[in-house]
Image: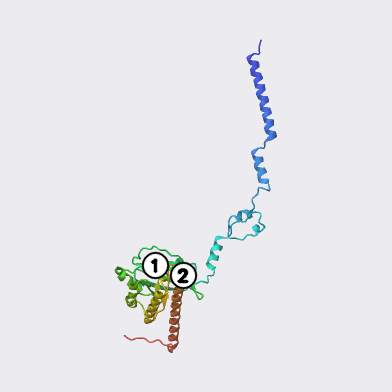
Amino acid sequence: MGPSLADELDAAMRGETTQRAIMGVVNESYSHPLADEMNHISSSKEMRVSPTMIKRRQFRPIEPPLYPEDPVRDTQKESTLADELSEAENRGNGNFGDSVDLRTPDRIFKVVFVGDSAVGKTCFLHRFCYNRFKPLFNATIGVDFTVKTVQLKGRFIALQLWDTAGQERFRSITKQYFRKADGVILMFDVTSEQSFLNVRNWITSVKAGVDESTVMCLVGNKVDLFGSDATRNTVYKAGRKLAEEYNMPFFETSAFTGQGIEYCMKMMAERLQKREEDHLEEALKLEAMTPVGNGRRSWCCL
C-alpha cells in the first residue's frame, strides 16, 4: 500500500523548507546586500573624483590634446574663452589693412566712392575689406555702406565706406551722400575711355556738395586688363594730368589682384588724419591769438 495523501504533503513541505534553507546559505555566502555594495564603492579611494578633475573640464585647451605618452602633456597651457577674446583684442597688427574691429576707433572718417557704373567700385571695397575678389556683383542700387577700422600711426581709425551707384537714374540719390564727406574717391575704368571722360562731370557734382577741405583722389581701376605697357603708359599720363589739374593724387589699382588698393586707402587715411591735425592746430592758434578780457561780462541793452 502506497503513502497516503497526508504523507505526500508532509514530505513536500519538508523538501521546500530544506530548499529555502539551502538558497539562503548560498545567497549569504556569494552576494552582498545593496547597502554594503554602495558603501564599498563610496569608500573606495580609486573611485573618488577630485575637485581638480572637475575644474579642468571648465577650461578649453588652446591647442589640440597631445598624445598620452607625450611628457609635455602635463604642462600644456590652458585658457578660458574670455582670455582668448582678450588676447585677440590685444593682438598687435602692424599692417594697415588688418582689421581691428574689437578696438574703439579714435576717429571716424566718411569716404564716398563715385564713378560710372561697372568701373569696379564694389569689387574695390570687397578686396579692401575682406581681401577677396568676387567676380560677380549685382549693380549697386542707390548706396551701399560698410565700415573698416584700421591702425595708422598708433591711432585706430574707422573708415565709413560709401559705395554709390553709377547709373544716371541714381544721381539725385547719390548726391545727397556727398554732404559731410571727409574724403571722396573718384574711380574710372582704365579700359573704358568714356568712364575716364565722365570723371570731370563727377568732379563737378562732388565739388558742389562737399567742403573745400574734403580730401579727393583719382583712381584708375582694372590695370590687370592692360594689353601692353604702351597703353598703360598712355592712360597713366592722362590720369595723372587730370589729377594734377584738380590738385589730387592719382593711383592705379586692380581689384582682381589687389594691386595698389591698400596703398591707395592708406594714403587717403593719412591725408584725412593730417587734415584733422591741421584743423586742430589752426584752432589752437586762433584761440591763442584771441585777447583775454578783464573778466567783466558785457550785457546787451534791449
Pointer 1 residue? 122
Pointer 1 local density, CA inside 10 Å: few below 14, some 14–19, many at least 20: many
Q: Position of residue 172 (x, y in %)?
A: 30, 71
Say whether disc 1 or disc 2 marks the residue closer to the N-terminus. 1
The type of residue carrying mark 2 is Thr
Q: Position of residue 50 (x, y in %)?
A: 64, 52
Number of marks present in the image shown = 2
Q: Residue at x 67, y 30 (%)?
A: 24
Task: Give residue 149's mark.
Answer: 2
Query: Is 99 on the left-hand or right-hand side of 162?
Result: right
Residue 95 or 92: which is nearer the viewer?
Answer: 95
- 254 horizontally vs 142: left or right: right
Which structural element holds mark 2? strand
Q: Relative to 183, does residue 55 appear above or below in the rendering?
A: above
The kind of secondary structure element at disc 1 is: helix
Q: Residue furthest top?
A: 1
